[in-house]
Amino acid sequence: MAARIEVEPANNLKIRAAILDGVPGNPDRPKRTAINLGNGDGALLIAEAEASIESAKILFGHWRYTSDFETWSGDIRDGNDGWYVRGEARLLSEREDGAQGLDGFARYGIPEGRFNPFDTFLSGGLTYTGLFPNHDDDQIGVAIATAFTSKQFRQFGPSLKHETALELTYRKKVNDWLTVQPGLHYVMNPSATPGTPDAVALMLRMEVSFGELFR
């Protein structure tokens, strides 16, 4: 259960806010659909501002849980929150078609390390639309994401300092109603657990437009 609002107080400026059930579903019965408000679940609050400048935009946000959480030292405290900033920009446009070209993004996040395994997050990536001739709508993308473990978490038990994931993906528009997107992920230091080997994961995402399919 959630509620969300968005306002645009000025040109190229948007402000969003949302409130969500702090513990969605029932953790004791994960396959059951349930809405349980109260009982210490609290709420998750999120606020975000987005500013657009020509072909770029930057977003700045804050999230916070209203309920108390157990810290890695065993205390029950409030203050489980975090900040983040994200930037997106068109880096290069093809002369023949402005929709084709290179886009980039970067993200930086700081969650509270007293409660969470990671206290710093960095990611970035590039996507090129129409890289290959006669495939104007296809997109190829590469990205990297790194999460750094908090000092408090490392004191709690054996842990590496980071987990890093690399991604390569290709989005192909097969026809007017079907799009497929295979992806390859390579994860170094999964869960930042010592002795865990690096992992490889394959992904296949499919999008179907039923309006085009039955037209």
Image (cartoon, rainbow, N blue to C red):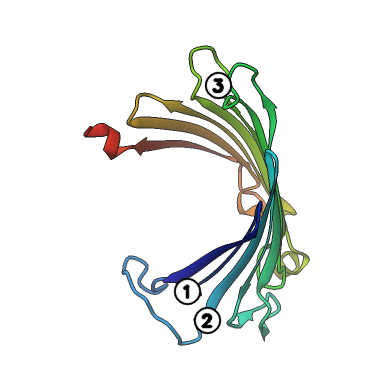
Tags 2 and 1 in contact by the CB under 8 Å rule?
yes
State the mark number for residue 81: none
Nearer to us: label 2 or label 3? 3
| Label 2 residue SS | loop
- For residue 126, say whether it is visible: yes
In this view, the residue farthest toward the right is 151
Mark 3 element type = loop
Asked if labels 1 and 3 touch by Cβ distance under 8 angstroms, the answer is: no
> Residue 130: which numbered mark, if any?
3
Q: Position of residue 175 (x, y in %)?
A: 35, 24
Work out how far the residue at label 2 is from the one at label 1, CA to CA, in angstroms: 7 Å
Which badge, 3 or 1, is on the more N-terminal residue?
Answer: 1
Give coordinates of residue 207: x percent, y percent. Answer: 37, 37
Q: Earlier in the sequence, mark 2 or mark 3?
A: 2
Q: Residues within 10 Å of mark 3 (few under 14, many from 20)?
A: some
User: What residue is shown with label 1?
Assistant: 23
* Horizontal side of residue 132 vs 179, given as left or right: right
* CA distance for labels 3 and 1: 42 Å
For image coordinates 66% across by 63% down, the residue present is 117
Which quadrant of the view contains residue 130? top right
> Please, is residue 23 above or below residue 192 in the view?
below
